Structures are given as C-alpha cells and as structure tokens.
Image (tube, rainbow, N blue to C red):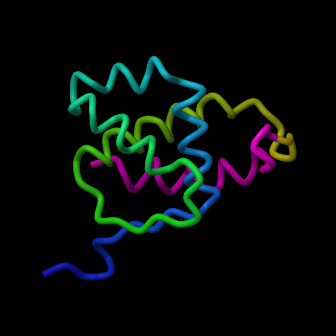
Amino acid sequence: MVTEKDFMALTSIACCALYCAYEHYPEVAKSLAQFVPPQMIEVFRDILENTGRLVFIPNTDAAEIYGTLASKELEGMSNIAPKTQLSCGHIVGEHKKALEPIAKMMKW
C-alpha cells in the first residue's frame, strides 16, 4: 500500500536546480546510461523543465539520476557564495537548499 511517506515532492526551485544540473553536467547524465535506460535520462530531464511542482514515487531510475546529478551540482557549487545570482533568477543558496535533501533521499 502506498502512503504519503512513499512520495517525493520537488518544489519549483528543486526542479530548476536539477534541470540546471543536467545543463551543467551533461557528461554525468550521459554516463548514467550504463545504469539507467538512456531514454529515461531524457524523460527525467524533460519533466523538470518549467515545472512548478513535481510529486512522484521515486523508483531506482529516478534515484540514480536525480541523486547523482544533485550531488554533482552541490559539489560544483561548494565554493560559490550562497547569495550569488544564477542565470535562472535564483541564488546559489536556494539551489543548494533544494538539492541537499534530494541528494540524501535519492541515494538508495
């Protein structure tokens, strides 16, 4: 039986941050094709573009893709000041805050 604890909700900032991770690290996304069907990598990216809120039950593909990209994006932002403005209109601190739980929760 599915309960609320089984769902993951991504805010618009989290969706934006993950979409940016795809853009910043295309080589990481492509390398995931050894673990996840390549078409799923594209589907999970396309879902994020211009999404206000995403609620879903994470599966192993989502965990692998989103967890890996969130971790990589956090690593890439580690030396950037939190108040730095991003091209999407958010600041680094907002993206970090949105990505941290994804990196933790999506690691199975």
At x 56% / y 35%, what residue is drawn? 21
Q: Name the residue: 46% across, 47% down.
A: 103
Image: 29 above or below 45: above
The residue range painted magenta reads 86-108
Return the x and y of residue 9 as percentages of the image width and height.
46, 68
Toward which corner of the image does residue 79 lie, by quadrant?
A: top right
Please tell me how many numbered marks the rendered image carries: 0
Indicate whether 7 appears above or below 4: above
The percent position of residue 14, horizontal first and vertical second, equals 58, 55
Chief secondary structure of the magenta span? helix
Q: Decide if residue 41 is on the left or right side of residue 45.
A: left
Residue 6 pos. (x, y %): 28, 72
Whether 81 is among the magenta residues is no
Q: Which residue sits furthest left?
A: 1
Q: Residue visible at 85% across and 42% down?
A: 85
Question: The N terminus lies in which quarter of the figure?
Answer: bottom left
Q: Position of residue 3 (x, y in %)?
A: 25, 82
* Magenta-drawn stretch contains 101: yes
Residue at image location 61% in from the left, 61% down from the top: 12
